Amino acid sequence: GENVEQHPSTLSVQEGDSAVIKCTYSDSASNYFPWYKQELGKRPQLIIDIRSNVGEKKDQRIAVTLNKTAKHFSLHITETQPEDSAVYFCAAKMNRDDKIIFGKGTRLHILP
Amino acid sequence: SAVISQKPSRDICQRGTSLTIQCQVDSQVTMMFWYRQQPGQSLTLIATANQGSEATYESGFVIDKFPISRPNLTFSTLTVSNMSPEDSSIYLCSVRQGAGAQGYTFGSGTRLTVV
């Protein structure tokens, strides 16, 4: 089955700097890669996603890159703000079923 | 996008008892998913709830412990049976977000404490 590795587990960056979170997946049949943000006590919220036929996707300060050959994908947050502090989860979905498998999460701290 | 109502939002239960969690979606969805999120941890898929057939369970989860119902395309329940303190966790349902969309939406979660 699919396995998703995520690192780092914790990341602290100065406000205004960039943050990068990296994930790898095991199943080459995976074709969809969402990223979720979870604030304390709240449900995970989809912030950006990418399909396997695309190498990069950007939405304002957030971007995701995908390297299918290496089976890894990354989340990039630029010009970080205090409200970016949260736990971020990467995930992967295989083509043959609908289930999403999550990485272990990255706790992002934005330092003032 | 689909709107999910999940209840109860939290409960404190005695060990050995059972709790049923409900998820209601405002539109018809083919698949619903049940996840567990232990404190400070990631989301672990328990099972996929299929309408009209038995749920499909992930490794480590069994129907006797987590029976699931899916009577129609807008509703599902997850029961946590014969609870022990180790079952204390947040349980979330999830559905695919909109027809044809790849994104998945989550319910607000049920925070379960077993004492």
Image (tube, grey):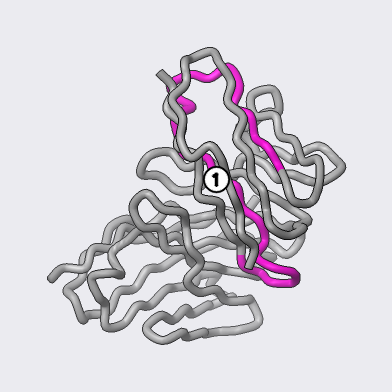
| Magenta-drawn stretch contains B97 | yes
B99 vs A58: above or below: above
Q: Residues within 10 Å of mark 1 (few under 14, many from 20)?
A: many
Answer with the quarter of the image where residue A85 lies. bottom left
Residue at the image position 47 percent from the left and 85 percent from the top: A58
Asked whether B43 or B115 is in front, the reply is B115
Residue A46 locus on image (x, y percent): 51, 67
Q: Is residue A69 left or right of residue B30?
A: left
| Magenta-drawn stretch contains A71 | no
Q: Residue furthest left?
A: A112
Answer with the quarter of the image where residue A87 lies. bottom left
Q: Which residue is mark 1?
A: B92
Residue B27 locus on image (x, y percent): 73, 60
Q: Is residue B89 left or right of residue B46?
A: left
Instruction: Tell me the quarter of the image containing the C terminus of chain A.
Output: bottom left
Residue at the image position 73 percent from the left and 64 percent from the top: A95
Asked whether B59 or A44 is in front, the reply is A44
Residue A31 locus on image (x, y percent): 66, 70
Q: Amino acid at mark 1?
A: Leu
B13 vs A69: above or below: above
Q: Residue furthest right?
A: B52
Residue at the image position 47 percent from the left and 15 percent from the top: B14
Q: Which residues are magenta?
A: B76-103
A93 vs A67: above or below: above
